[in-house]
Image (cartoon, rainbow, N blue to C red):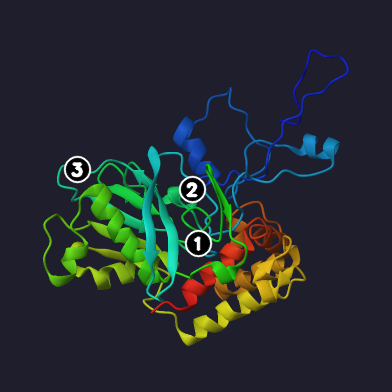
Amino acid sequence: LAGLQTEEPNHVSLLLAAPETRFEADTEHLLRRHWGDTRNEAVARPQGPLKGNTSPICGAKASEVLGFKYRSWQSSQPVGSGHQQRRSFSSVSTVSSFRCGDVTLSNGRILEDAELVYEVHGKPNETNSNLVLHPTSFGATHDDLGYRIGPGSEYTLDTDKYCVVVVNMLANGVSSSPYRGYGECYKRISGLSHWPYPSIYDNVLLQARLLEDVFGLSVIGSSDGHTGSSPLALVFGYSMGAMQAYQFAALYPNAVQRLAVVCGAARTSPYNKVFLKSLMTALKTDAHWLEEEERFTGHPMRGLKAFGTIYAGWGLSEEFYRNEEFKQHGSFESLNHFLDDYVDGFTDLDPHNLLAMLATWSVGR
């Protein structure tokens, strides 16, 4: 579709479309799911192949007339960056907030009016034995993790069988963070010197409180071998979410039946800390960084692009680039095209939250 007809003689209707869908499955799979292998003649047939998440709708005419291209409504970061690029629309869910009050952290500092925002997919059974805890990963929010959750065996976490609780990590911009812009909460601290820097351990303690107070599980008491309720069916985590999963199982072994960790470690290795240090340094070299107040005076676009470029070399493997697998994840025609899109995915993120999450990551143990 290049353009739409209009009854107004001096006007033209243009179709505004991003080149990628970024849904939970590739485009061909989605088309087959809705129309089957033999598509109805009424369904427009694209002229080119629909590789990866290429959009079946063409916005070329609009781009030509208006002079700029449209981007997907979701972040463009690919799998491996921690901030997922595709969203599932197959799971009905509810988002809620768990207020914890003022919390004394493991470093002795106080996180005032602590709050965890969580999303629930599916329903718990009578004994709560089908609960799955899914902490978020670096840079990700509950919105980003829906692509692996839904009804049926095609999803990693099947909501026909399980009730999946996705908990936003502290400092991710949704739960308590240096900067929050989620829902009705808009809050920015005056500088990172005022952020108390919670650890992975602190995150897990609050998650246990949430499960006890909201779902009635006996989690905290299970650390000494006693539990009055069914254990969690699974704790599932990717990257920093995997670190939280390991910590949860270590603290409450009798409250967890299974553990699924993807691309994660139980502690941050010295080699990993070098990577994290390089990200922090690149971001702080931006001219907007004010060291004495530990804050940015403006949006550090140059620092965020440097941050994203470094992450591109660590978050994805040498094999990924050597085999040009990026061409399978969208309409990328070249390495530079992919890198530009990848790096742009970091430029809308709040830099204070990024530094706070990196600090949590770096002290993981």
Secondary structure found at label 2: helix
Q: Look at 21% across and 64% down and name the residue there.
A: 220
Q: Which mark is residue 143?
A: 2
- The answer to whether one can see residue 257 in this image is no
Few, some or many residues within 10 Å of mark 3 (<14, 14–19, 20+): few
Instruction: Say what amino acid the circle numbered 3 marks.
Output: Asn
Q: Between residues 244 and 360, which one lies in front from this camera angle?
A: 360
Secondary structure found at label 1: loop
Who comes first in sequence, dot 1 or dot 3?
3
Who comes first in sequence, dot 2 or dot 3?
3
Secondary structure found at label 3: loop
* Mark count: 3
CB under 8 Å between discs 2 and 1: no
130 up-or-down from 267: above or below:
above
110 up-or-down from 152: above or below:
below
Residue for badge 1: 171
Q: Look at 36% across and 47% down and name the residue there.
A: 154
Q: Residue furthest bottom?
A: 270
The percent coordinates of residue 92 (x first, y second) are 38, 37
Quarter of the image containing the N terminus? top right
- The answer to whether one can see residue 112 in this image is yes
Q: Look at 38% across and 40% down and name the residue there.
A: 93
Residue for badge 3: 125
Cα distance, mark 2 to mark 1? 15 Å
Who comes first in sequence, dot 2 or dot 1?
2
186 up-or-down from 309: above or below:
above
Few, some or many residues within 10 Å of mark 2 (<14, 14–19, 20+): some
The percent coordinates of residue 81 (x first, y second) are 55, 64
